[in-house]
Amino acid sequence: MTPNTNMGSQVHYPPIAKSIPKKTKFVIGGMSAMGATILVHPLDLIKNRMQLSIEGGGVLHHRTTLHAARNVIMREGFFALYNGLSAGLLRQGTYGTTRIGIYSNLMEMNTGPDGTPPSYITKVLIGISAGGVSALMWTPTDVCLVRMLADGRLPPAHRRGYTNAFNALYRIVKEEGILTLWRGCIPTVTRAMVVNASELATYTQSKQLLLSSGYFKDNIVCHFGASVVTGLVTATTSTPWDVAKTRIQNMQVINGRPEYRGLIDVFTQIIRKEGFFSLWKGFTPYYVRVGPYTVCLFIFMEQLNRLHHKLRGS
């Protein structure tokens, strides 16, 4: 393979196009995130079930990703893989819209007049900012998602039985108080900062490096290569925070006493009862999810950007 000498020294990113209005970037980001979520939701459910498997050191319910998927289908039916989809779409329609919109606009603000992109450190800081602010605002949608994904694993008498995301929001406030919607806020925000620094910054940087090498064009091959790197980095750095977040948001309060006292207590109990590497429980479905999700997210975003330009005749 020979380098593409027609690339030039400047690298452009369709998802961060300067001619797109700021409000439109938020809309495109949300639509892209929701589209990607529809495709990878079953992997999110499997990841969630594996993270809650042998919680507290009990019996191992799901040995592998395929075993978890088989158990869900055999016990709950095939369409159980899409349990909680309404909460997933609500989360991406809120959190996803906000984080990608903030990231895109901050990237534009920090891009040089000649199109020079910001440094990797700046991209990381932008990702941290976008993730932290978005997660703090929309933790309630994440609480709904985690509970709806986990409900099928509980005995029938203990299931919450939320009919949809809005029903979950209403019942949580009514039955447990409005502050319950921000349960696990600290690990949720921390995870979001790690994920966005890893996912958005690493994808942008990886794509920039691939394009500047001259061996790649701005097409699906380049997007796939960048997403593979991004998925590995994101999954490795954020899985422990995702496990902690899932445990806290799904915990039940028995006789006025919560299962976990906080983030440190979650990590301590998991390591003591289940082993250190249980912090990466659900890593395989998480990684398998992150890769396709990243590809779909950015492909959808770039196509919507191009559609916007076409409709405007630019």
Image (spheres, grey):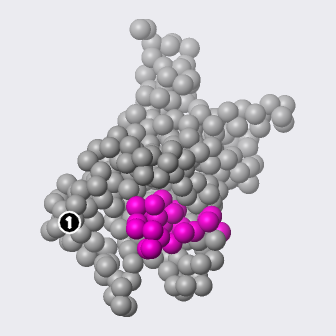
Q: Residue 273, percent across and down?
A: 16, 67
Which residue reaches farthest bottom? 256
Amino acid at the residue labelled 1: Gly
Q: Is residue 277 highlighted in magenta?
A: no
Residue 216, placed above or below residue 95: above
Question: From which residue to which does the magenta span run?
Answer: 142-166
Q: Residue 234, percent across and down?
A: 38, 47
Q: Residue 91, percent across and down?
A: 58, 60
157 horizontally vs 28: left or right:
left
Name the residue beneath numbered marker 1: 57
Q: Residue at x 33, y 54 (%)?
A: 50
Residue 57, placed above or below residue 85: below
Location of residue 83 (image quadrant): bottom right
Q: Is residue 161 highlighted in magenta?
A: yes
The residue nearer to you, when weighing 184 against 121, is: 184
Q: Main secondary structure of the magenta part?
A: helix
Q: Residue at x 38, y 83 (%)?
A: 253
The residue nearer to you, when weighing 272 against 84, is: 84
Q: Residue at x 59, y 34 (%)?
A: 299
- Can residue 205 be seen here? The reply is no
The residue nearer to you, when weighing 17 against 115, is: 17
- Can residue 18 be seen here? The reply is yes
Q: Residue at x 60, y 73 (%)?
A: 169
* Quadrant housing the C terminus: top right
Q: Residue 68, percent across and down?
A: 35, 47
The residue nearer to you, when weighing 54 against 268, is: 54
Q: Residues within 10 Å of mark 1 (few under 14, many from 20)?
A: some
